[in-house]
Image: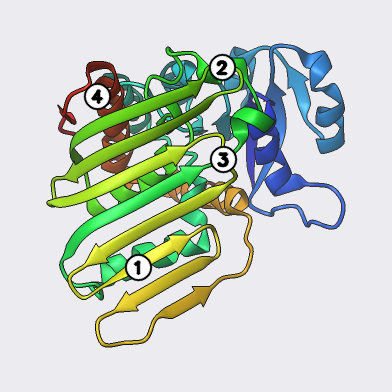
Amino acid sequence: MIRAAVIGLGRWGRNHVRAVQAPGDVPASGALRFTRAVVQTPEKSQAFADEHGLELGTDFAAVLADPAIDAVVLATPNSRHPGEVIACARAGKSVLCEKPLALTLAQAREAVAACVDHAVVLTVGQDKRRWPSMDALADVVASGALGPLLHAEGHFSNENTRNFQTSWRELPEEAPAASLTGTGIHVLDAFIRMFGPLDTVLAQQLVLAPAPAIQDTLSLLLRFHQPLSAVLCGVRSTPLFWRAHVFGRDGSAEAIGEHELVLRRSGAPLERRMFGPVSALRLQLESFAAAVNDNASSPSPAHWPIAPQQLLATVAAVEAVATALREGSVVRAAAV
């Protein structure tokens, strides 16, 4: 059993805790349990901490010095991630950092290097990788069933700015790539998982209403090193919708939401696969726990749930999108 601390008990930090130790009819995970939490204002989180058996405090350094803590989950503002990851690594704590790992490639390199140097596991909260539809899409692409790959399309939308407004998430210094920084990064990560590093991007954001009731659209025209073209779009204020569609010479595969995959292949009838519900966050945390256990006997980035090069490539792509939005021109992503 991996004993973990969560840093930050906002909406997403609490979701991590609930995923593995929700009370009631949901069995607790046998792989990972949260025992400590660090927050800025304990009085706002005391009831939640009591409900879930968390020792609550305000001292991050005290958690890092605690030998009873094996791993740390960071659910903190984006700009804090690199420094906190490095602090965890130096304390010998494996770390699951909410996305993005960093806002610049240079910071991401420092965070990854620290975890390699101190032989701890590092992963990032890309829980949509654990959606059944996205696992199936990645498997189809890897199988070669679509033939040579030609193009991809992705879309993300949610109503978080309406339902879960958090002021820091809209600050330019925390979200330089607009809605891609915290939400669209899931689709971007899926593309990098399947296609490898980004080559170039042209970006457009249309803002129809400012914070706090943001209404905006984001459109990205992407090219990967493979080579392969892609379009990635988001409409932040419209109801939840997810789509990742990969086109090859011999067919296409389209993940729609969490549970559906549609296959279209030359000379074959359309195939629709439906999948049952899962807790993607729980699967992500249990995968992290397994990696921490494996790493304890043979420390190596080979145990990391997401390969270091993919972690870096995603941050390089986010940084390129931020630059493209700022400059209004085609931008080449830095090599990783």
Q: CA distance from mark 1 to mark 3?
A: 24 Å
Tell which circle, 2 or 1, labels the residue nearer the N-terminal end.
2
Q: Nearer the viewer, mark 2 or mark 4?
A: 2
Q: Secondary structure beneath disc 2?
A: loop
User: Mark on residue 238?
Assistant: 3
Position of 30 relative to 118 (above/below): below
53 left or right of 224? right
Which is more toward the observer, 288 or 171?
171
The x and y percentages for residue 39 are 69, 17
Residue that mark 4 sits on: 324
Q: Nearer the viewer, mark 3 or mark 4?
A: 3
Determine whether label 3 and label 4 are within 8 Å by CB: no
Tell which circle, 2 or 4, labels the residue nearer the N-terminal end.
2
Determine whether label 1 and label 3 are within 8 Å by CB: no
Residue that mark 1 sits on: 253
Q: CA distance from mark 2 to mark 4?
A: 21 Å
Q: Nearer the viewer, mark 2 or mark 1?
A: 2
Residue that mark 2 sits on: 211
Q: CA distance from mark 3 to mark 4?
A: 24 Å
Mark 2 residue crowding within 10 angstroms, few (<14) / some (14–19) / many (20+): few
Mark 1 residue crowding within 10 angstroms, few (<14) / some (14–19) / many (20+): many
Q: CA distance from mark 2 to mark 1?
A: 36 Å
Tell which circle, 1 or 3, labels the residue nearer the N-terminal end.
3
Residue type pointed to by label 3:
Thr
- The residue depicted at 24 percent of the width and 27 percent of the height is 320
